[in-house]
């Protein structure tokens, strides 16, 4: 998150706004966030969502509040709850409009609308991040996605997702390519230094 008021306040906490609830005694904002984030990184989507919502209930203006809101959307997306994820990403844009999480929210909205087979809404959100947040990683990703889709469309390559049964068979090839990309990039970086 990047709320300047929160960054300047002791402990990164701005005095509670009208939508906050007084936390129970001895509840640390950082421990609450870290616990939810731990559940998130472990793929425990429901626990992570509950933890981030608890964090936002007590600390809606904390330095990490916008990150917690994005992570609620990300957990819902990962759980395949795309319509619910849209609502959470939109909250980032409306509730935390001046934070560094807004480009991520627009980009994730684009991905989510793609999953819901709503290409016009996906394009609208990708364009919002490309035009309004140039130079961010999300704008770069959106541009790359647009270029790739255009190349595929121009080459008339049909888009098909492999059946679930074929995924384990293909995984080893993907992992091998990623390994080579990482190692080649690493060795090139060593030579450049």
Image (spheres, rainbow, N blue to C red):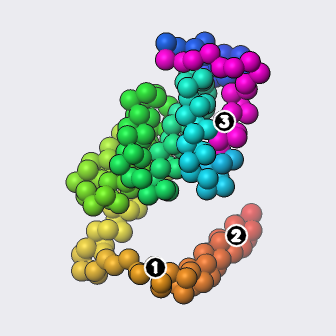
Image quadrant of residue 12?
top right
Q: Residues within 10 Å of mark 1 (few under 14, many from 20)?
A: few
Q: Earlier in the sequence, mark 2 or mark 3?
A: 3
Q: In this picture, which residue range is highlighted in magenta?
A: 19-37
Q: Position of residue 132 (x, y in %)?
A: 36, 39
| Disc 2/disc 3 C-alpha distance (Å) | 33 Å
- Identity of the residue furthest to the right in this view: 26
The correct choice, above or below, for 151 with respect to 145 in the image is below
Residue 91, labelled with which disc?
none
Q: For this view, does 96 lie left or right of residue 59? A: left
Dot 2, crowdedness within 10 Å: few (<14), some or many (≥20)?
A: few
Above or below, 20 against 30 in this view is: above
At mark 3, the secondary structure is: helix
Secondary structure of the residue carrying numbered label 2? helix
Callout count:
3
Percent position (x, y) of residue 36? 65, 41
Disc 2 versus disc 1: distance between alpha carbons?
Answer: 32 Å
Residue at 66 percent across and 35 percent down: it is 33
Q: Earlier in the sequence, mark 3 or mark 1?
A: 3
Q: Which residue is mark 1?
A: 164
Quarter of the rendering occupied by the C terminus? bottom right
Asked if the residue at tag 3 contacts the one at tag 2, i.e. Cβ–Cβ closer than 8 Å, the answer is no
Using the image as rendered, state which of residue 22 and residue 186 is in the foreground: 22
Does the rendering let one see residue 41?
yes
Cα distance in 3D space between marks 3 and 1: 34 Å
Q: Which residue is mark 2?
A: 186
* Residue on which disc 3 sits: 33
């Amino acid at each position: 998150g990047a709320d300047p008021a929160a960054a300047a306040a002791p402990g990164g906490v701005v005095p509670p706004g009208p939508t906050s609830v007084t936390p129970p005694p001895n509840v640390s904002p950082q421990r609450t966030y870290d616990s939810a984030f731990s559940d998130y990184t472990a793929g425990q989507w429901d626990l992570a969502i509950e933890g981030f919502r608890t964090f936002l209930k007590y600390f809606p203006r904390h330095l990490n509040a916008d990150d917690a809101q994005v992570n609620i959307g990300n957990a819902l997306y990962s759980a395949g709850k795309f319509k619910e994820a849209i609502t959470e990403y939109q909250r980032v844009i409306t509730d935390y409009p001046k934070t560094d999480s807004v480009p991520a929210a627009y980009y994730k909205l684009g991905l989510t609308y793609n999953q819901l087979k709503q290409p016009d809404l996906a394009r609208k959100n990708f364009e919002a991040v490309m035009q309004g947040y140039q130079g961010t990683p999300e704008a770069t990703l959106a541009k790359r996605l647009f270029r790739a889709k255009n190349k595929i469309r121009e080459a008339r390559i049909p888009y098909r997702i492999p059946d679930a049964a074929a995924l384990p068979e293909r995984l080893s090839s993907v992992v091998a390519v990623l390994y080579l990309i990482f190692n080649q990039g690493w060795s090139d970086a060593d030579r450049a230094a």
